Image: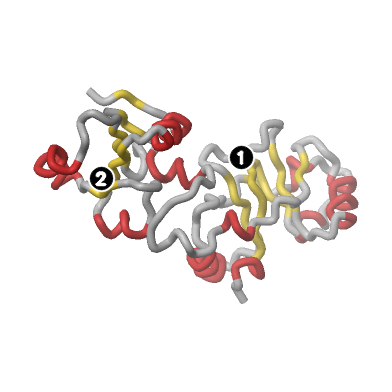
Amino acid sequence: MAQEIDREGVRRLIEEGGQVVDVLPAKEYEQDHLPGAINLPIRRIEAEARRVLDRDRPIVVYCADSA
Amino acid sequence: MYDFRTGIQDWMGAGLPTEGTNAQRPRLVDVVRRDVPTFGLGERLGDVRDRVVAAGWEACVVVSEDRVVLGLLRAKELQGDPNLPVERVMRPGPSTFRPFVTVEEMRRTMTDRNLASSPVTTADGRLVGVVLRADVGAG
């Protein structure tokens, strides 16, 4: 179960070396994404997360907004 | 694992940096006029008009105590009865735009909707400033 985090929390985690995952479609990711974010669209996340992400570092996942 | 539920809209709305093809394009945050005069609901229109003109503006924004946008007073509304309170004269609930909207996108919007001025706000409606047509290159 993921823990909710706010903007300031995300900033802190990025500074501390956390991994940021953008789950939006690649086209939207290409236009704008958080600094250093990795693009893992929803349909690929299950297949690729283990290979791409470091389980020992914090992971933040985001999309456009919660709406 | 953390869930940033308010997402990139919230991030960009706060004016934080992003990466990507849009990152180098000018956005409203780069051109917004932060010195637009602001007034509260109860102020007298005649007083407001004098102060708007003295500040070199033709419009102003009506805001709450915590700077949430409530309405606009354009040149037309400013010419109303000087004894009326702002609340009776303002154009309520104007369309607002977020600071991360690109100037290019805003130019199209202001042209299509024939907007002379538009408030720019944070996601929770607090005023950042105003953009005029000239600020986004709209004819």
At x 31% / y 43%, what residue is drawn? A63
Checking the image for residue A20, the label placed there is none
For discs 2 and 1, the disc positioned in front in the rendered view: 2
Q: Note whether residue B113 is visible.
A: no
Q: Is residue B114 left or right of residue B85?
A: left
**Three-letter residue code for mark 1:** Arg
**Nearer the observer, B44 or B133:** B133
At x 90% / y 52%, what residue is drawn? B50
Label 2, label 1: how many angstroms apart (C-alpha)? 29 Å
Which residue was labeled with disc 1? Answer: B126
At x 49% / y 64%, what residue is drawn? B25
**Three-letter residue code for mark 2:** Val
At x 80% / y 55%, what residue is drawn? B78
**Nearer the observer, A66 or A7:** A7
Checking the image for residue A23, the label placed there is 2
Badge 2: few (under 14), some or many (20 or more) residues near its Cα, within 10 Å? many
- Residue B74, given in percent of the width and then of the height, sits at 73, 57
Q: Secondary structure at mark 2?
A: loop
**Nearer the observer, B130 or A16:** A16
Q: Residue furthest left?
A: A47
- Residue B72, given in percent of the width and then of the height, sits at 69, 50
Which quadrant, please, contains the N terminus of chain B? top left
Q: Secondary structure at mark 1?
A: loop
Give the chain of mark 2: A
- Residue B109, given in percent of the width and then of the height, sits at 51, 65
